[in-house]
Image (spheres, rainbow, N blue to C red):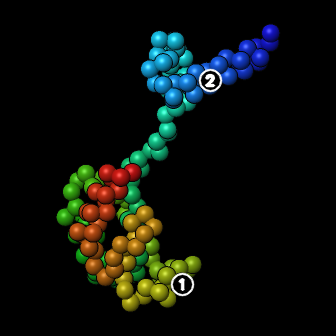
Amino acid sequence: MSNTTKTFTRTSALLKQLEEFKANPNSLRPALSPAERRAWLSISRPTLTPIPTKFKLRMLTKEECQLCDEAKHTIETELSEPLKRMLVLEEVDITEDGNEELFDRWRYEIPVFYLDGKYLCRNRIDMVKLRARLEMRRQNK
């Protein structure tokens, strides 16, 4: 018997045992060796997606924007250290080449904030919303 055939036969047997185990969880516990049990657990457990450690706060801005400066200061002073470590601030100047669409849409509303690509607020940073979304994402993801 070739190695491929042996592997296929053993895999088929394990899959059969797995189906029996699903029907009666206590039926196979003594029959499975520790190695077989580990193999079964690796097949039956769902994989979890990793929790992102950083979230991107995108701030649409332009030169000489006092509200933008105030927003950065507010984030720096009012956000707790654990939440600050979770956050990466990306400033996007809407007056730069290639940002014409952003300029046309937001030129009178700066600063505008997006958290991981989802709109958060505009004109002034809403710290209550920012904290709530960061906490929610930290717990859910």
Residue ID at (45%, 67%)? 117
Residue ID at (44%, 73%)? 92
Point out residue 104 in the picture as x, y percentages from the top left corner: 49, 88
Residue ID at (31%, 58%)? 136
Q: Residue furthest left?
A: 78
Name the residue beneath numbered marker 1.
100
Point out residue 73 in the picture as x, y percentages from the top left corner: 24, 69
Instruction: Please tell me which residue lies in front, 47 or 25.
Output: 25
Res 14 → quadrant = top right
Amino acid type assigned to the residue bearing label 1 in the image: Glu
Instruction: Please tell me which residue lies in front, 63 or 75.
Output: 75
Point out residue 96 in the picture as x, y percentages from the top left corner: 51, 79
Vertical placement of 109 versus 2: above or below? Answer: below
Say how many tags the image has. Answer: 2
**Distance Cα–Cα, label 1 vs label 2:** 61 Å
Left or right, 97 with respect to 5, comes to left
The mark found on residue 16 in the picture is 2
Q: Secondary structure at mark 1?
A: helix
Q: Quadrant of the N terminus?
A: top right
Point out residue 20 in the picture as x, y percentages from the top left corner: 55, 24
Q: Mark 1, residues whose alpha carbon is within 10 Å: few (<14), some, or many (≥20)?
A: few
